[in-house]
Amino acid sequence: MRKLKRAMKKVLRGERGITGLETAIILIAFVIVASVFAFVTLSTGLFSAERSKETIFAGLAKAQSNLELHGSVVLTGAQDTETPPDGQVDQGNLTFQLALAAGGSPISLDPSANNSRVVMNYTDSDGRVEDVPYTAADIVGDGDQMLEPGELFTITIALSAADGLELGPNERFTIEVVAPSGGFMLIARTMPPAIDPVVDLH
C-alpha cells in the first residue's frame, strides 16, 4: 500500500524518466560536435605540416645554391693611369676562384645571360657599384658556363675608373656574389700600403 502511494505521488509531481528518443538525440549531437572538432584539428595540422614542408624545401634550395671561394683574391696588372698619378689603381684585374658548396645545384656563370645568373656587386669607401661586368673561365669543367659539382671557375673583374672601380692604398673593398636562388657570399679584402703589379690580397 505504501509503495502504491509513493508511486502515485511521483506521477502527481510530474516526474518522468528520459526516453530512448531523447537519449539518441543527445548522443547524435555529441557525435556531430566531436566530428566537427576533429575535422578542424586535422585540417589545421595538415596545413601546418604543409607549410613546414615548404619552408624546409625553400631552405634546402638556398643551401644547395651556395658558392664557395677557393684560393686567394689576386690583383694583377695594377696601374695608376691618371696624369699626374692620383694614387688610385684604376687599371688591373681582380681574380678569384669559385666552386659549388657540397651538395650544391648547378649555377649559371654566364655574364651575358638575362636571368638566372650570378650577379657581382662591388663596394668600397667611395660607394657601391651593382652588377659589375665580369668574365668566367672554367679551370676544371666541361667547357660550358654552368658551374657544376666538382668544377672550378676563375672570375675576373676589371678595374675601371669609368665604372667606379678604383682602389687606393689601405682601402678595404667587398665583392658581393649573389646567386640567382639561394644565399649570397661576401668577399672582403684590404689593399696593402704599397701596391705592386701583382698583389695577393688579404
Image: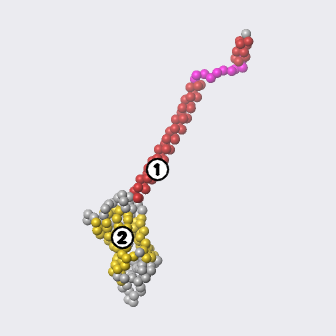
C-alpha distance separating marks 2 and 1: 38 Å
Question: Which quadrant holds the C terminus?
Answer: bottom left
SS of the residue under disc 2 = strand
Q: Is residue 134 visible?
A: no
Whether residue 147 is in magenta: the answer is no
Choose top left, top right, bottom left or bottom right for residue 108. bottom left
Looking at the rendered structure, the number of numbered marks drawn on it comes to 2
Q: Depth-wise, is mark 2 or mark 1 nearer the camera?
A: 2
Q: Amino acid at mark 1?
A: Ser
Choose top left, top right, bottom left or bottom right for residue 134. bottom left
- Label 1: few (<14), some (14–19) or many (≥20) C-alpha neighbours in 10 Å: few
Q: How far across and how far down the image is residue 38, in percent?
A: 52, 38
Furthest residue in direction top, as rendered:
1
Q: Residue at x 39, y 56 (%)?
A: 61
Which numbered circle lies on residue 71?
Answer: 2
Q: Are marks 2 and 1 in contact (CB under 8 Å)?
A: no
The residue at which mark 1 appears reads as 52
Q: How far across and how far down the image is residue 91, in percent?
A: 35, 81
Q: Amino acid at mark 2?
A: Gly
Furthest residue in direction bottom, as rendered:
84
Question: Which quadrant holds the N terminus?
Answer: top right
From the viewer's perspective, is residue 83 above or below residue 29?
below
Nearest to the observer: residue 39 or residue 103 = 103
Q: Residue at x 58, y 22 (%)?
A: 20
In the image, taking residue 137 as reference, residue 25 lies left or right, namely: right
SS of the residue under disc 1 = helix
Which numbered circle lies on residue 157?
Answer: none
Highlighted range, magenta: 12-21
Magenta: main secondary structure equals loop
Q: How far across and how far down the image is residue 150, in percent?
A: 31, 62
Give the mark nearest the N terminus, 2 or 1.
1
